[in-house]
Image: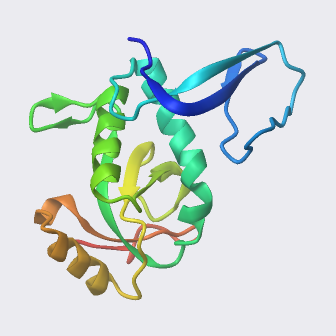
Amino acid sequence: MAFAPCAGAVVVTLLLLGHIVRDPDTIGHVVLPFPSIATTTTTATDPSATASPAEASLLLRDQVLADHRAVEQLVGQWVPQISSIKLDLVINGVTFDYPEIWANYQSLRAQYPQALLLNSSDYVNFSGKDFWVTVAGVAFGTADEANAWCDQQGFAEQECYASRLMHTGGPAGNSKIR
């Protein structure tokens, strides 16, 4: 499926040694870590547009890169975890592939504009690796405060709970189910 244009947004994509690289931290210029083989300019996607599996995979990776600095500001603090989906995970009879994971994230981001996307493999507090995790993007001093936020937002008990993002240690003591 094709990308739907988003008014005024342009993303520069570089094909470097057979890999597509996008640098979300550069605006107006591009940092080239390797000699460029080919350069293309594409219009960014409308977040509500349906993306192919390959496009959605890139969109997810791009979003993790774009949100990385903000997520790092939350390390060591309690945050509401509002989604955690792995490729091919089946939930309520739906098998999640990249387009469904991207759509899930976009839906949450539309409702909670401060929401951030991360990959569970980047943080030791997650026991499962390669999950696309959406956190609310707000920090709390305690797990109970983060869980109270989940309650205030009307999330079902299994859909939102407190998680403490960490780079050291492990999963033990870094999540609290409601």
Residue at image x 23%, y 64%?
Answer: 160
Task: Please state the horizontal and vertical placement of residue 136, each as a whole percent of the image.
Answer: 36, 64
Task: Please state the horizontal and vertical placement of residue 32, each as a whole percent of the image.
Answer: 85, 32
Q: How is the image coloured?
A: rainbow
Task: Please state the horizontal and vertical placement of residue 98, each as a whole percent of the image.
Answer: 37, 28
Residue 144 in sight: yes
Residue at image x 78%, y 17%?
Answer: 17
Left or right, residue 104 beside residue 22: left
Which image quarter holds the C terminus? bottom left
Relative height, residue 101 to residue 39 (above, below): below
How many marks are shown on the rendered structure?
Answer: 0
Task: Please state the horizontal and vertical placement of residue 148, each as a whole percent of the image.
Answer: 21, 81
Q: Quadrant of residue 72?
A: bottom right
Left or right, residue 105 beside residue 25: left
Relative height, residue 51 to residue 172 (above, below): above
Furthest residue toward bottom:
141
Residue 178 in sight: no
Residue at image x 40%, y 45%?
Answer: 132
Asked whether 92 or 1 is in front, the reply is 1
Asked whether 22 or 19 is in front, the reply is 22
Furthest residue toward front:
8
Which image quarter holds the N terminus? top left
Q: Quadrant of residue 173?
A: bottom left
Left or right, residue 126 beside residue 162: right
Asked whether 46 or 53 is in front, the reply is 46
Asked whether 169 or 2 is in front, the reply is 2
Relative height, residue 101 to residue 153 (above, below): above
Residue at image x 62%, y 30%?
Answer: 10
